[in-house]
Image (cartoon, grey):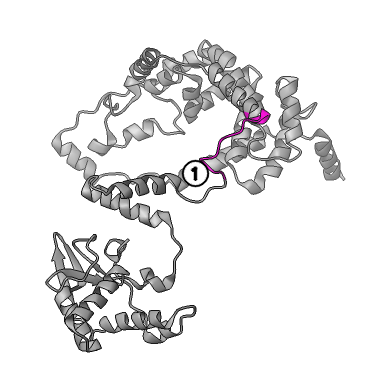
Amino acid sequence: MTSCEAGNPLHPPTQTELLGTSSMSDDQITVEVFVVEMQDPKSGVKGADQKLNVTIIPHVINGQDILAWIVTKMKVTTEEAQAFGTMLVAYGYIYPLQNHRKLVLVPDSTLYRFQTPYFWPMQKWPAEDIDYAIYLARRNIRKKGMLEPYEQRRTHSAMDYGLDRLIDPNAEEVLTFDMVRRTNIFLTQALMRSAVKSSVSLTAFVKYVTTHHNHDPFLTTPVPSNPWITDSDEFWQLNSRSVDIPTKLSVERWVLSFWELISDPRGRVDFKLFLKKEHSAENMAFYEAAEEMRWGAASAIPEKSQFIFNTFLKPGAPRWINIDGRTMGLTVKGLVVPHRYVLDAAQTHIFLLMKKDTFYRYLKSPVHKDMQKRALVPAPHVFTDAQLEANVRNRNPGISPILLWQQEEEEKAAAAAAARPIDVKAMVATNKLDRK
């Protein structure tokens, strides 16, 4: 690969560096020193920038100047100087810019360039196919497939093999019992995997879009107005997390799925109120505790796992959850060495229980029906141009996300304190101490 394609040539080594190089013959040292003298800015072959097509190539020399410099330097005839120059081109010290196949020194205006010292024969690099394959691939792209037959064969073999591998790709594979067993397991799982027709997938997609059409602000105009257009923040206030009475559109979205319900903070509060009336609030409390353990700080995992065990999983716990024995056993065993995902099985069990049973009872409950009646239906805004300008002037500053996060943390801490089991013995002992 030429230095024109690899980048700008490096600064040529000095004569001292070349003479200090070990494992080189005297003739080779003489050639390297000679090439360095040719590149000397003052006494070497004069070069100039050359524009080739749309690229400007620096330090370009022509064959006529090279030949004249060799004749002057070595005090030889023109024929001998041309033979020596051809040797320099053939060994890669100088390379032609236009015709890469013609590795001879032509004593005319043919353009040449000094090769980067990294590719000089003195380096004695071992033969490697990767660089040559990259060079041939670039030539193949540039020439649009116009490569010599031997170059085409070389390109395929070099690029297909790649780096040295631990396994020979050309070696015949010997089947073993373990390979056959793993293949059977893979094929069995592939056959058991459910396949869905494209028509069924498209029908489900159309159904989803139709269902969520009214809840997508890109497809339906937000009510009362789009705050990004009208500079009115009433839309955000009506849909904030701490709003007392949500909008009717938000309540309608809770009905779509259980995930939509608990994804909305206001909907989750309403669902907790229903669970509390049904005396099953421990399910949502355990689900939230598992979420905090999964996404919380790693340093707090031991403390949270101990709290979850004492509150929800321990026999006789104050908020014991009802899950099957196998899941309970695996979860309790995993809490010996707790990690983020140790509660996944139990959390999934509780989630499916609330999704398949509690959620549908919530939709029929008086709690949800009362919320549907009280839900707000804001009137659409109709602003004039003057009112829009006034909205821009009186724009309220947005609520800082840091303040919202702090508020959520305080609410979580208050809820955790209220849900913490009461130690009756400790209260009795404290009362005795107070009386004393």
Main structural element of the magenta stretch: helix, strand or loop?
loop
Q: Write the start and end of the magenta stretch as one range.
A: 167-179
Asked which quadrant contains residue 88, the reply is bottom left
Q: Where residue 354 sits: x, y (%)?
A: 59, 19
State the residue at coordinates (19%, 84%).
Answer: 77
State the residue at coordinates (75%, 21%).
Answer: 325
176 in the magenta segment? yes
Q: Where residue 307 sits: x, y (%)?
A: 71, 37
- Residue corresponding to mark 1: 405
Using residue 215 as the reference point, say whether residue 296 is left or right of it. Answer: right
Q: Where residue 310 sits: x, y (%)?
A: 75, 34
Using residue 198 as the reference point, say whether residue 345 is left or right of it. Answer: right
Q: Where residue 59 sits: x, y (%)?
A: 21, 74
Query: Residue 336 or 423: which is nearer the viewer?
Result: 336
Asked which quadrant contains residue 13, the reply is bottom left
Q: Residues within 10 Å of mark 1 (few under 14, many from 20)?
A: few
Tell me if residue 319 can be seen.
yes
**339, above or below 280, in the image:** below
Using residue 61 as the reference point, say whether residue 434 is left or right of it. Answer: right
**215, above or below 60, in the image:** above
Query: Residue 408 or 72: which is nearer the viewer?
Result: 72
Residue type indicated by callout 1: Trp
For the C terminus, which image quadrant? top right
**219, above or below 113, in the image:** above
Tally the marks.
1
For the N terminus, which image quadrant? bottom left
Query: Residue 379 or 409: which is nearer the viewer?
Result: 409
428 in the magenta segment? no
